[in-house]
Amino acid sequence: MAFILKRGTTLGAMSAEDDQAFLADCLVRTSDLERITDSANPKCIALGRTGAGKSAILQQIENTSVRSARIDPEALSLNYISNSNVISFFESLNINLDIFYQLLWRHIFAVELLKLKRQMQNEAAARSWIENLRQSFENNDRKKRALNYLTEFGDKFWLDTEERVREVVRNIENHFEREVGISVDAFKAKIHADAKDGNSQSIKETSDIVNRATRVVNDVQVQELNGIIELLSEDVFHDRQQKYIIIIDDLDTGWVHESIRFKLVRSLIETLKKFKRISNVKIVIGLRVDLLETVLQNTASAGFQTEKFEDMMLRLSWAREELMELANKRIAHSFKDQYTSTIPQFYDIFASKVGTQDSFDYILDRSLHRPRDIISFMNECLDQAVGQSKINQNNIRNGEKEYSRKRLRSLADEWRETFGDLESVIGCLRHVPVRFELSDLTDGAIETLCLELLAGDGVSNSGTFVKACSLVADTNQSYASIRRALIETLYLIGAIGVKLSRGTPYNWSYKNSPILRYDSLTEESSFAIHPMLFRELNKRADPTTLV
């Protein structure tokens, strides 16, 4: 049946939140879904780039799980922590609050799981359950201490999560003032006076108070925290046939003040590992790759290494046939009202070839193999074919121009929080061939980039490369450090691939190793610009030889 492509026809929105009309009918079940919901599988962090399907897979889990709960980070009101005089003061003293932040997450999860298991929605039900459990621990001091800990740090299980968080923080605040015997405001004034007059005895007293404050944080009853996990595993979630899932998404949004957000995310990841001891409970979170990279940059320490948590990370990936299924389902959904006897699929709407290449492969080669890229490219093609009965190869090529422009801008936006301005950084690839050597990134090209960055307004142009360029300008250092950062960053974000030695294929961060170590490069190493950027950077090459 012939039909006309109408203006405004779309195959979906760019975010899962705005794509609800398609998600319900067009879900593609991948192997990732089975792996992350399997209680025996350690994978519990759905790690992917923007548009890789993290929110969609978490929504599938929520929709198909009988016993699940979603924790909305914004609903936790964790800004209460950053606004706390005591907590912000501890941070200013560089007191390590990792234990406290982990305590917070363990408390949140323990209470949410208890609510999910026992449906404790009111005070009477909660107190009755606690008392019955306490009596059963008559001869087990460890478990009684764990239960006492829960009630000490906020026994109002029936309240919403936000109020329980406030209870935990208030308890820590009160503990500090009891231990130190001085208010935070008075202590701040004392430190200021000590620094001003240099009184050695006063400074010693201040140092003693700082040490006592550190003990307050460290005395958050680690043994009781471990006892809580044991209690939940052995006495609450002992029916291994029933599976319970807690879901957390939207950790990249403004749910808490930037001053503590990265530390809270790091502590969350560390806390997940502890709850793996409860075999029929799984806590699943969605995490963007750029957010993880920013967390690592901002919370670097000897105790937190990505490798230790790699077995928990499910790096979302899509095979060609899965992306084709996604395209077919969305086309069928969008055009179902225009067909009466057959269900339309990709090649019913798109020309079969672009030149000599399969049209779907043409689109796939210019993507990072994630749903958002495929949907975005197809939408641009639809816009080019309004009034026609089919999208021809010229429409696809013309759609690629706008798609490529948006891809460059989207790459910069995706990684802005991590690196600052990247549009100029990606733009420096205009000065090198599609396939290039390290030597093609000349000092002149890097100097031009630095001049462009340093001439910015200081707001939109800020971040890693502005700082690096400023350092070189101020100290007359060579451009070697910037060249190194350029290569590693452009690879990480997917703008370039690397061929480590002659005769080997190009590696890309979205399907091979996500990180490129500059020290692994040799004289044989070479690079290639990703085909998604060709049109915007005015490049020409055969993408099939690159990706």
Image (spheres, grey):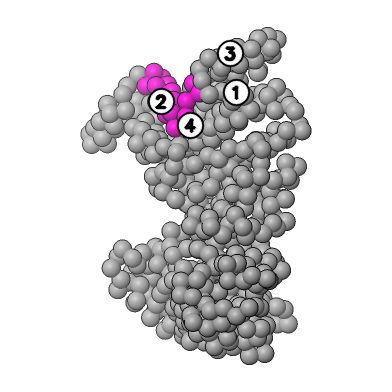
Pair 2/1: label in front: 2
Q: Which residues are magenta?
A: 155-179
User: Is 192 contained in the magenta span?
Assistant: no
Circle 4: is it few (<14), some (14-19), or many (20+) Cα within 10 Å?
A: many
Pair 1/4: label in front: 4
Residue matched to label 1: 224
Sequence-first disc among 4 and 2: 4
Residue matched to label 4: 161
Tags 4 and 2 touching, CB below 8 Å: no
The amino acid sitting under disc 2 is: Arg
The amino acid sitting under disc 3 is: Ser
Q: Is residue 152 left or right of residue 56?
A: left
Residue matched to label 3: 128
| Place of residue 319 in the rendered image (x, y in percent of width and height, measured from the top left) | 70, 67
Sequence-first disc among 1 and 4: 4
State the CA–CA distance, disc 2 to disc 3: 25 Å
Sequence-first disc among 2 and 3: 3
Out of 279 and 28, give the one closest to the viewer. Answer: 28
Circle 2: is it few (<14), some (14-19), or many (20+) Cα within 10 Å?
A: some
Residue matched to label 2: 170
State the CA–CA distance, disc 4 to disc 2: 14 Å
User: Is 166 contained in the magenta span?
Assistant: yes
Residue at horizontal 56 percent and vertical 17 percent from the top = 125
Regarding residue 202, the answer to whether it shows in the image is no
State the CA–CA distance, disc 1 to disc 4: 21 Å
